[in-house]
């Protein structure tokens, strides 16, 4: 029996994209055991993937922070009998762990993030040949370790029954169409301007038989979402009322999710909800598009010669005006959502 340590600590969206891969591999090799090391907050994503999958949660801001935290982690994993290490992150912390494990005789494989290809795409803006998807890069690591597997994942709720009663704090029953709106991301280059997004909320909230659910986290995001939910009818702000499992449950009942290039796109993908995604500084061709999402559901400006300018959206706008977001009209976002809803009803 092999015991495989799988390392992917952050970010939320990248960790979510690992779920289909871990499930597919673990399902093909039931005689082996797979332990996913990730942030404690992300652990629920892996808790119901199978009897041979478990989580090693890290408190990266506390007990497992810095050099002392790294040594604590090393001490913990060195006694658990791992035979293989799948480094799906390739950052300083995971490098330290995998080097130690390799020196002590474990078989090790590391993700190829394609940094050179991504840099070249940013430089030449040639988007005709999309780069290998992150999920395929995750699979390649398992292939190197001797665990090839076809993708068989569909939906997180294939493994646990849905219980609508768990959503009573935000909804008593589902009526009409439910639309999720996740307007935030970590970086400005990936956020549709909030004044324009508010207009989208205003338009959609006025539609008949439609309920909007707003998604975000943190104090500042909560302020914005609370203001919108108070200002517009049929708009619900569930932030702070649901843990991750219940938030995934709520998302699973949506008819469509409107998201940035951010974690909510990937969470919705895990429960087979179509996503209308808005892209600015980044681009789907860089390999981070939602799992099994329809490429037709993207909203982006295709005639800007400065785009994409960043892999993760963290760089300041070279033009200074964030044209990649401001040139996207509110109506085009609304029309894309309506098109997805109409397609689902055919």
Image (cartoon, rainbow, N blue to C red):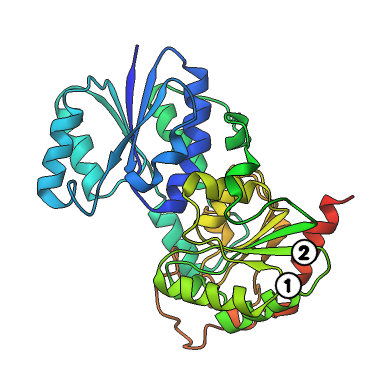
Residue 166: horizontal and vertical position, in percent? 58, 44
Residue 325: horizontal and vertical position, in percent? 58, 78
Residue 280: horizontal and vertical position, in percent? 56, 72
In this picture, is 197 found above or below 2? below
Q: Using residue 263 as the reference point, say whether residue 251 is left or right of it.
A: right
Say whether disc 2 or disc 1 marks the residue closer to the N-terminus: 1
Near-viewer residue (65 or 171): 171
Q: Using residue 52 as the reference point, say whether residue 338 is left or right of it.
A: right
The answer to which image quadrant residue 102 occupies is: top left
Circle 1 residue? 205
Near-viewer residue (217 or 58): 217
Crowd band around label 1 with a 10 angstrom C-alpha radius: few (<14), some (14–19), many (20+):
some
Which SS class for mark 1? helix
Circle 2 residue? 210
Q: Using residue 160 as the reference point, say whether residue 81 is left or right of it.
A: left
In this picture, is 257 found above or below 186? above
Gap in angstroms between the C-alphas marked 2 and 1: 7 Å
| Residue 304 showing in the rendered view | no
Crowd band around label 2 with a 10 angstrom C-alpha radius: few (<14), some (14–19), many (20+):
some
């Amino acid at each position: 029996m092999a015991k495989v340590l799988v390392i992917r600590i952050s970010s939320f969206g990248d960790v979510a994209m690992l779920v289909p891969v871990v499930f597919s591999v673990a399902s093909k090799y039931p005689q082996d055991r797979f332990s996913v090391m990730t942030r404690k907050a992300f652990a629920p994503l892996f808790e119901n993937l199978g009897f041979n999958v478990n989580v090693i949660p890290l408190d990266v801001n506390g007990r497992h922070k810095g050099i002392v935290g790294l040594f604590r982690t090393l001490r913990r994993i060195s006694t658990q009998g791992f035979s293989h290490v799948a480094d799906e992150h390739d950052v300083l912390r995971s490098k330290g762990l995998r080097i130690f494990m390799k020196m002590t005789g474990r078989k090790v494989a590391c993700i190829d993030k394609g940094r050179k290809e991504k840099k070249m795409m940013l430089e030449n803006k040639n988007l005709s040949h999309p780069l290998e998807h992150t999920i395929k890069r995750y699979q390649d690591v398992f292939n190197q370790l001797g665990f090839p597997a076809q993708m068989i994942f569909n939906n997180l709720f294939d493994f646990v029954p849905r219980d609508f009663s768990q959503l009573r704090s935000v909804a008593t029953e589902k009526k009409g169409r439910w639309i999720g709106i996740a307007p935030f991301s970590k970086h400005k280059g990936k956020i549709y301007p909030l004044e324009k997004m508010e207009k989208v909320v205003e338009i959609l909230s006025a539609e008949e038989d439609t309920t909007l659910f707003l998604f975000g986290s943190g104090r500042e995001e909560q302020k914005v979402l609370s203001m919108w939910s108070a200002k517009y009818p049929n708009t619900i702000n569930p932030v702070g009322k649901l843990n991750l499992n219940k938030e995934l449950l709520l998302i699973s009942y949506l008819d469509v999710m409107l998201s940035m290039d951010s974690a909510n796109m990937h969470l919705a993908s895990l429960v087979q909800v179509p996503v209308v995604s808005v892209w600015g500084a980044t681009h789907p061709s860089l390999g981070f598009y939602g799992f099994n999402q329809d490429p037709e559901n993207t909203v982006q400006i295709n005639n800007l010669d400065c785009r994409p300018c960043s892999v993760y959206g963290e760089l300041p706008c070279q033009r200074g005006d964030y044209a990649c977001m401001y040139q996207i009209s509110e109506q085009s976002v609304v029309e894309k959502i309506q098109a997805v809803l109409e397609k689902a009803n055919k």
